[in-house]
Image: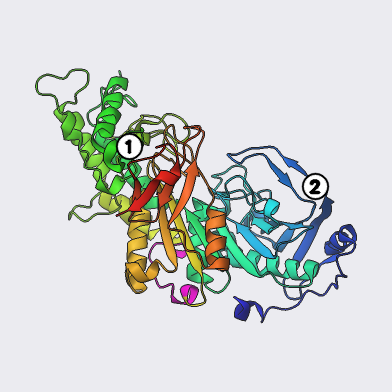
């Protein structure tokens, strides 16, 4: 990291000692970086205050800080539209010496408030004294999935990977200008699109960051959408039809069928960790099969017809092409597969992450896979195929993955697949655990949520302790609103939490990680 940044040009505006932080903050309005078009639109001192909990983040006391906002590389693009890498950075009064870059979400297009609360437990990065930066990745959007910027070549490049590196370099320069010294450590934390971006930092900018956290990475969106359609199509084929002959959304399974599936799933897999608690902590060892619910005679409540069994088996096995090759991993059977809140579970019959459930009863996997793999934007932003992390690991970089087992959009099996391939390419599983670990969160949906999930965990402390203290995380404790008073360890893959057999089963201290 220091080797890379040592070649960066210095900021031309001198900043005095921090005896007058408000005045020093105001000076950043005139910040100039030679060779990098920069427009500062805000340099304001923000008094200490309390941030009310929102977006899944807890209520937190934030320190006084300098907020700087602006646009890097501003230009006029296709159709006369204005483009540029929008950013915001918070510089706390009592700086702890670290810099955190936040990942984005969806198709980005907006600058998130630079607080750093993503998977930081009850204390956001800014509250810990970290400098925090966020970016819109190079364009403004009207919503989370506004893809109109993709008409502009540079905007696509910025979104896919360029803005990550440009923002990282600029943030470091601003930090050095304000505090008169570089950050001691730099981190990147993101989930979904931010998880894909986190992967890219280790692959394309291997010397920029000391620690990276990648949650539920959107590493193969085209193929994950294809896999969602595979589940929907399998169910559509057995669903009753409306007056126009179209499958009734969600009609393949009744509410009673869904309840029976989850009940049987828990009967088979819940107790594998030593405790019956409504959660499946050993998804890799779960041997549930929908055929276990097959009716012995005519269809009745509490059992599944042959058509229902076959449809669920086919959908959850994942799409295969005409030659039988696995196109995308299937999905885990977990408690969230019938979820109706947030992004609906795969068996819920609700809307998918990208719109209504697919109404057709046929699917050309070969054609869809070719289109997904051949998408130019997906190719340049690909984070799934690159596994050589020798430079990132070589300078001491640490990488943590996490993924909800009930994620209906991006399968946790796909993150496991990447982790296994990455491990094989970097010396094997045991060696890689010195630099990278993966944590699965039972019952959790996409980046959080779940009626039977413990989705509050502190990956920021886990990664910083690993980088700064050399303490590798064997597990990370998790809590959640779904189960007040309950805590469990999320264990590093391939281990899972196992009850020791004595002590309060609601306390994480009474569990150990076993393979």
Crowding at mark 1 (Cα within 10 Å: few <14, some 14-19, many 20+): some
Who's the residue at 38% across and 55% down the image?
A: 415
Q: 115 and 193: which one is in front?
A: 115
Q: Is residue 145 visible?
A: yes
Which residue is under mark 1? 275
Which residue is under mark 2? 48
Who's the residue at 32% across and 71% down the image?
A: 428
Q: Secondary structure at mark 2?
A: loop
Mark-to-mark CA distance, 1 and 2: 44 Å
Please say whether residue 308 is one of the residues in the magenta stretch. no
**Residue 233 quadrant:** top left
Image position, residue 142 (x, y; %): 62, 43
Looking at the image, tell me whether mark 1 or mark 2 is earlier in sequence order: 2
Predominant secondary structure in magenta? loop
Q: Is residue 436 left or right of residue 514?
A: right
Who's the residue at 25% across and 43% down the image?
A: 286
């Amino acid at each position: 990291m220091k080797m890379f940044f040592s070649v960066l040009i210095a900021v031309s505006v001198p900043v005095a000692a921090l005896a007058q932080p408000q005045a020093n903050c105001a000076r950043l309005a005139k910040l100039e970086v030679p060779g990098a078009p920069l427009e500062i639109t805000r340099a304001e001192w923000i008094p200490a205050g309390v941030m009310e909990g929102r977006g899944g983040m807890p209520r937190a006391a934030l320190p006084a800080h300098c907020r700087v906002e602006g646009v890097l590389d501003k230009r006029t693009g296709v159709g006369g539209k204005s483009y540029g890498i929008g950013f915001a950075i918070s510089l706390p009064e009592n700086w702890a010496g670290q810099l955190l870059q936040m990942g984005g979400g969806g198709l980005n297009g907006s600058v998130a408030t630079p607080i750093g609360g993503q998977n930081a437990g009850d204390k956001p990065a800014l509250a810990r004294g970290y400098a925090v930066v966020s970016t819109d990745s190079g364009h403004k959007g009207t919503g989370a999935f506004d893809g109109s910027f993709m008409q502009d070549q540079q905007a696509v490049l910025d979104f896919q990977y360029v803005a990550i590196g440009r923002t990282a370099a600029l943030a470091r320069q601003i930090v050095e200008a304000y505090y008169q010294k570089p950050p001691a450590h730099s981190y990147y934390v993101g989930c979904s699109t931010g998880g894909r971006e986190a992967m890219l930092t280790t692959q394309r900018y291997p010397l920029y960051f000391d620690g990276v956290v990648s949650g539920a990475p959107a590493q193969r969106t085209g193929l994950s959408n294809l896999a969602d359609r595979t589940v929907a199509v399998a169910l559509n084929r057995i669903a009753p039809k409306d007056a126009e002959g179209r499958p009734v959304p969600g009609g393949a399974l009744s509410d009673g069928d869904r309840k029976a599936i989850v009940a049987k799933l828990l009967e088979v897999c819940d107790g594998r960790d030593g405790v019956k608690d409504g959660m499946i902590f050993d998804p890799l060892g779960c041997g549930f099969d929908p055929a276990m619910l097959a009716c012995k005679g005519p269809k009745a409540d509490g059992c599944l017809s042959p058509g229902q069994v076959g449809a669920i088996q086919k959908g959850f096995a994942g799409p295969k092409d005409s030659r039988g090759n696995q196109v995308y991993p299937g999905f885990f059977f977990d408690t969230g597969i019938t979820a109706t809140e947030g992004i609906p579970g795969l068996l819920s019959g609700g809307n998918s992450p990208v719109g209504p459930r697919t109404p057709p009863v046929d699917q050309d996997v070969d054609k869809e896979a070719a289109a997904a793999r051949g998408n130019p934007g997906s190719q340049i932003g690909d984070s799934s195929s690159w596994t050589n992390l020798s430079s990132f690991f070589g300078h001491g970089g640490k990488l943590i993955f996490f993924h909800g087992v009930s994620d209906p959009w991006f399968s946790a099996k796909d993150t496991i697949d990447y982790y296994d391939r990455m491990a094989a390419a970097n010396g094997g599983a045991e060696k890689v655990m010195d630099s990278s670990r993966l944590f699965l969160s039972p019952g959790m949906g996409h980046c959080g949520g779940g009626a039977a999930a413990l989705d509050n965990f502190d990956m920021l402390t886990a990664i910083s302790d690993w980088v700064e203290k050399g303490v590798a995380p064997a597990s990370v404790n998790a809590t959640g609103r779904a189960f007040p008073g309950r805590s469990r360890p999320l264990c590093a893959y391939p281990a899972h939490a196992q009850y020791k057999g004595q002590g309060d089963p609601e306390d994480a201290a009474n569990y150990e990680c076993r393979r």
